[in-house]
Image: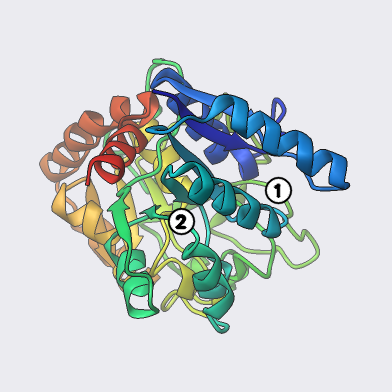
Amino acid sequence: MSKILLINDIKDDKTAGLKARVDVMNTLKEEGYEPLFFPRFTSIEVIIAFWKALSKTVKKGDHIIAEYPCWIKRRLYLVKAFSLFRKVPFYSIIHDINTIRFQISPKMDIMVLKLFDGVVSHNYSMTNWLKTNGYQKKIADLEVFDYRLSPENPYAAGRPAGAYKLLYAGNLSFAKAEYIYNSRIRMYTNFVLHVYGQYLEEDKFRTQGVVYKGSFDPNKPAFDSTYQFGLIWEGTSIDTCAGDYGHYIRFNNPHKFSLYIALGLPVIAWKDAAVARFVTDNNIGFVVESFEQLNSMLGVLKPETYQEYAANVARFSMKVRKGHFIKTAVSKLINA
């Protein structure tokens, strides 16, 4: 039996944007999946060649997986036609759903997702959204994206003598992470926020209490300090997660969450983020409503409580480094 993973032209990527897709590809290759290049349909000759490649590779009893979103969605209709012709299941692993992110009509995403016989969803919150909006086929929850790293020493530190050091890694543009530009952060004395990433708008960044540390290679994160927590927060405000990106973390698994776990860092998350349930259920950190509450809770955090968080997150660190969660979710989907 062949297991086929359709892949786009992913080269040796050095930015965080494609790491999740590269990690999925490498993990499923370990599970026996055969990558098949998914070309852009620039001519009828390309389409015919791709159909022939599918015909040569895919037999009855096999299955096909594509990742979503897929650049140039019409390619998926051809694969769906082939799967019906060959009578093989066609599944998908969801990376993003932009109609959730930008709070627009879900009709287009749902219409395309219905091409698949089942999907891997991020978590219970995204799964509920899919069902509410009309997706009624098989769904397996991922829980956490994996973050493939070599088994090096984690970056987590013990409880500090002074202020806690919090790590935030990601897109630092004003549109996505406006909260890091908020001058009120300087009022909070129990933590210092260190931010890593691209697109910082230096003309707007004058925030005391937030330290910009530059960008990093997501495949070999080598931060110049040790941290006590990773922060899951997005949007326009420090009082709550607001705006499109603040709304989106109610449903998605931010890839930075996986990075923190891979590094062995306990996590502080917004209380309404989808990953908040994973944080609290597994006692790998705590959740807060606002930066005010974050500062207060750090002020009374006991050393033994922090050590519990660190010990618990260590149990998951090697799992995300080795691809445990995508292997488990795909297996559940295929065998459901």
The residue positioned 86% from the left and 40% from the top of the image is 45
Q: Is residue 140 above or below residue 97?
A: above
- The answer to whether residue 46 is seen in the rendering is yes
Q: Which residue is mark 2?
A: 116
Which of the two residues, 64 or 285, is positioned nearer the viewer here?
A: 64
- Could you tell me the amino acid type at mark 1? Gln
Dot 1 or dot 2: first in sequence order is: 2
Q: How many marks?
A: 2
The residue positioned 42% from the left and 65% from the top of the image is 188
Which element carries disc 2, helix, strand or loop? loop
**Marks 1, 2: nearer the viewer:** 2
Q: Is residue 160 above or below residue 71?
A: above
Using the rendered view, name the quadrant where residue 77 is placed.
bottom right
Which of the two residues, 31 or 209, is positioned nearer the viewer here?
A: 31
Give the left or right position of residue 112, taking residue 198 as reference: left
Residue 198: image tag: 1
